[in-house]
Amino acid sequence: MKILIMNGPNLNRLGRREPGIYGSTTMEDCLAGLRKAFPEVEIDYFQSNHEGALIDRLQQAADDGLAGVVLNAGAYTHTSVALLDAIRSVDFPVVEVHISNVFAREDFRSHSIISPACEGLIAGFGMGGYKLAVQALTESARD
Ligand code: DQA
């Protein structure tokens, strides 16, 4: 089983970026933990600060026979109709993840443009949200 984790803008700075909100764990550490916790799952990772690059990678994933994608679109969550359309264009499930509880922050973070196209949403559990999302995808793939 193959899963792709995709992170959007500024998430390359996890570990150093606003640690009071996003914690001090790096994405590299998070990925190492996930690969240990799910040895049977092939976990690919892609991060970009560019909207089009995220869309290109998602479209490419459509040819990869993936069980699903875990997507933290960062700020594009709140702005990107193009990403919403891209998620609608692929036939595997996409789980939306936010490290922080976006509903407990500024009002503009309460609205996700991409949620309607996603299988489900996990927010507010810190980096643990990625693990919950992989678990959700592996369990739904087995059903
Ligand atoms: C985020 C929340 C977004 O509002 C923000 O723009 C991010 C990170 C999160 O993981 O909590 O970049 O997606």
Image (cartoon, grey):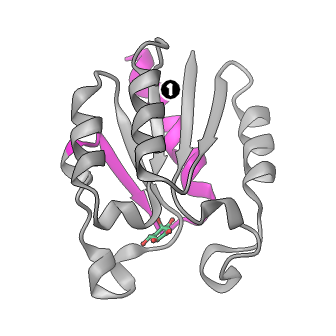
How many labels sit on residues? 1
Q: Quadrant of residue 75?
A: bottom left
Query: Where's residue 26, x and y in %?
Result: 77, 60
Task: Give the magenta range.
Answer: 117-143
Question: Is residue 7 rendered to the left or right of residue 37?
Answer: left
Q: Secondary structure at mark 1?
A: helix
| Residue 136 lies in the magenta-colored region | yes
Q: Quadrant of the N terminus?
A: top right
Instruction: Residue 56 in the image: state x and y as whole percent.
Output: 43, 33
Q: Is residue 68 left or right of residue 38?
A: left
Q: Position of residue 107 (x, y in %)?
A: 27, 86
Residue 134 higher or lower than 68, as above or below:
below
Q: Which residue is mark 1?
A: 138
Q: Is residue 29 magenta?
A: no
Residue 46, how many percent across, how many down? 61, 40
State which quarter of the image contains the C terminus: top left
Around disc 1, counting alpha carbons within 10 Å, would you say few (fewer than 14), some (14 to 19), or many (20 or more)?
some
Comparing 128 with 97, the one in front is 97
Question: Residue at horizontal 64%, vertical 30%?
Answer: 44
Type of amino acid under label 1: Thr
User: Residue visible at 66% across and 85% down?
Assistant: 20
Q: Is residue 13 left or right of residue 6?
A: right
Identify the residue at image location x=39%, y=19%: 62
Asked if 52 appears above or below 72 in the picture, the reply is above
Residue at x 38% of width, y 84% of height: 104
